[in-house]
Image: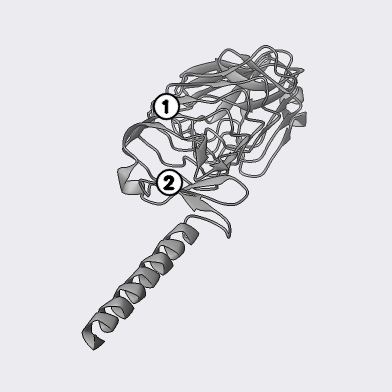
Amino acid sequence: MKKFAFRILMAAALLALAACLASCDMGSGGAAGGASSPEGLYGVSAGGALSVRDKSKMTGAIVIPEEIGGVAVTSIAERAFEGCTGLTSIDIPSSVASIGSYAFLGCTGLAAVAIPPSVTSIGVRAFASCSGLASVAIPSSVTSIGGGAFIGCSALMSIGVDAGNADYRSEGGCLLSKDGTVFLACPGGLASVSVPSSVTSIGDEAFERCTGLASIEIPSSVTSIGKYAFLGCTGLASVSFAGAKSQWGAVRKGYCWHVYVPAAAVHCSDGDCSL
């Protein structure tokens, strides 16, 4: 009788331990009230921010689920997929409204990404150093793109923007403000760029680390160039400005705007002047 009672007590203790471990495992998927995927690949906070629990398994084509454990995935957490070099494509569900800063930083194998029309914001350097990414399409829903979102994407030939987007537009594969006055980002795969004549300002980091860029033509309409605008453009040998030397001298230039640029002069309409 005593042995039987002992066995019952042991069984109850083991069941209690198993329940405790399961509870702890679910809690590790995110903030309090979060959940984890059945495969243990993802976690999601109570607010719906997706995180990756096992980055070693993030290889090949990945389809992010719309919900995990009954919790809707509404955002991709900051640095969620950072350094997942084996990732080749990512399908983001229509439940996602924001892509966090550095979310896909250094995903060098990422060649394709589908951004759904539910996304309204893309964080700082969200896709930076995705050296295999060849093109990206920004849907009409996006109202905010963080600085350097596509820096270091050396194979990127085009940043497309849906015509219905109220805040951004694409011209020559480059990202501009909707009114065309601010040049925001150059795809890292372009070898030459002619900045549109509508542009009056080249934004911060607009050409940063475009190492394959060999030549650029800047219109006389440009009156300011932001900080780090051409930082690390190590192949940029030719810079042309459509205005006179006096106009170039009057252009406001930001901090470290041309560090590591090999070009020594700017070719203006009335002769050369120093960069």
The correct choice, above or below, for 75 with respect to 157 in the image is below
Can you tell which quarter of the image residue 216 is in? Answer: top right
**Residue placed at 69% from the left, 40% from the top?**
254
| Residue 94 rendering spot, x and y as whole percentages | 57, 27
Q: Amino acid at mark 1?
A: Leu
The correct choice, above or below, for 77 with respect to 128 in the image is below
Residue annotated with mark 1: 133
The quadrant of the rendering that contains the N terminus is bottom left
Residue annotated with mark 2: 37
Q: Of helix, strand and loop, which one carries label 1?
A: loop
Image-based side of 59 in relation to 161, left or right: left
| Residue 219 rendering spot, x and y as whole percentages | 69, 16
| Residue 133 rendering spot, x and y as whole percentages | 42, 26
**Residues at marks 1 and 2, CA–CA distance in whole angstroms:** 27 Å
**Residue placed at 58% from the left, 40% from the top?**
75
The correct choice, above or below, for 85 with respect to 263 in the image is below
**Label 1 environment density (alpha carbons within 10 Å; few <14, some 14–19, many ≥20):** many
